Structures are given as C-alpha cells and as structure tokens.
Image (tube, helix red, strand yellow):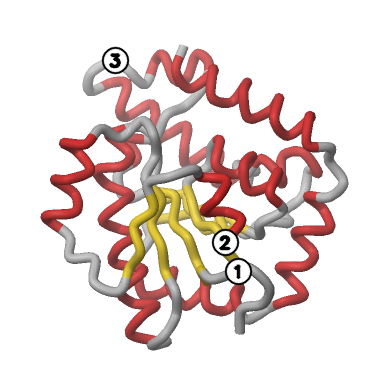
Amino acid sequence: PMTGTKDINIVFFTGSRPTHFDVFAPFCVDVARRLIAERPGIKIAIQRSLFIDDERWDHFCARHPLSGIELLMGSSLDALERAELMVSLPGTSTAEAMYMQTPMAVLVPLNRPELIQLDGLVGLIGMIPWLGTLLKKAAIRFMIRRRRLVALPNIMVRRQVVPEIVGVLESTPVAAQLLELLDSPDQLAAQCEVFAQFPATTVAATAIVTELKRWI
C-alpha cells in the first residue's frame, strides 16, 4: 500500500540515449504489462527523458499500447517524488533517485550487448566495426564475472544496496523481482538510509559529471 504523497508504485526511466530508448522502452512496457497482470490496480508510470525527441516518443507510443500506464513528460524529480520505486538503466537517473531518496532497481540487459556504452579505451575500441563488437562483448563478460557494481549508490558505498538485475533479461522474471522488492519495506528503507548519508550537493555534482561523460 502507498503512503503519504506517493501515488505511483513503480516508475520506469527509459533511457536518454536514443539507441538505448528504442530497445529499453519497449522492454519496460512488457514488464509493466506483466506487473499489471500479476497485480491489478498497481500504479505504473513511464518517464520520458528530455533527450528523446517528439518523433521518437510518438513512434514509441504508437507501436506499444500503454493502457493502464501513466506517461510522464515533466520533471524527472517530480516523478521520483511521486514514486515508491524507480527502475532504470545505470546512469544519471540513479543519481537523481539517490538525491530524492527514492528506492530503485537498476537493470542491465545484455540482450543487445552491442548497444552498451563503455567508458575509456574499451569504449573507443568498441566503436570499431565487427572487431569492436566482439571485444566489447568480451569486456562485458569479464565485468560480469568480476561483479563490477554499476549503480551509482552501490559504487559510492562499494557494496550492493540497490538491486542490480544483470543478464539476458525477460519480462516475467524481472516483474517478479520488482514485486518482491516493492513488497520488502525493510529493503526500501535500507536504501533510503544509505542515500541520506550523502549530501545533496555531492549527489548533484556526481550527476553532472556523469551526464557530461555521456555526452562529450
């Protein structure tokens, strides 16, 4: 049950890179449908990034029926204030949720590994046609084996506080994991306790640096 000003159970942040959005947004809709089928009455929303243009957004909405899902096109912070749980890819949205002290789960779908953006030399090598894709896949497999943390709060505390769901993802098991988390108030409260340890200025600065690294 929702309390206070929370009127959304789960909000999906569908990515700010167009190539990520084109793949991740439909997956979020599939997960949302599973959630609604499993738990009628659950409140689901999808947040549109400012970096997704009208044409791409309209094309997405036309191809994927969104009955029962609220579409949010305003401030991402307003969406986080309304939500019990935020779900996204790794990135700036995790810094925003941390700032708003909104519990979250981070998805790392490896269904299309060639779309994953890597930093540094590996990221540059990954841009080479054919060979780059093979090397990128190998680098991703290595990072998975090393269990590298990807969510900003986890990186900052050097342990997994925020669930990271990594792998070739399917909507049904992901929906089940999200419902389990939503039904675990102790886990949600534990996340908020960790988020409260970091001043808002630190979180905001980290978000700015993260965003600049993604677009420069």
Farthest residue toward the right? 197
Q: Who comes first in sequence, dot 1 or dot 2?
A: 1
Give the side of residue 138 with respect to residue 131, left or right: right
Secondary structure category for the residue under label 3? loop
Q: CA distance from mark 3 to mark 1?
A: 46 Å
Q: Give the side of residue 135 with respect to residue 161, left or right.
A: left
Could you say whether the residue bearing mark 1 is in a helix, strand or loop? Answer: loop
What is the spatial separation of the Cα atoms under label 3 and label 2, in whole angstroms? 42 Å
Residue annotated with mark 1:
6
Question: Would residue 148 be seen by someone viewing this image from the given angle?
Answer: no
* Near-viewer residue (179 or 150): 179
Q: Residue at x 36, y 80 (%)?
A: 36
Mark 3 highlights which residue? 128
Badge 2 is on which residue?
Answer: 82
The residue lying at 54 percent from left, 24 percent from top is 211
Which residue is drawn at the image coordinates 30% and 35% (left, top)? 52
Residue in the picture at 19% in, 54% down:
61
- Vertical arrangement, residue 163 with respect to residue 213, above or below: below
Residue type marked 2: Arg
Between label 3 and label 1, give the one nearer the viewer.
1
Residues tagged 1 and 2 counted as in contact (Cβ below 8 A): yes
In the rendered image, residue 67, in percent from the top left (x then y), is placed at 24, 72
Q: Are marks 3 and 1 in contact (CB under 8 Å)?
A: no
Q: Is residue 167 left or right of residue 30?
A: right
| First in sequence: mark 3 vs mark 1 | 1
Is residue 63 or residue 107 the one in the foreground?
A: 63
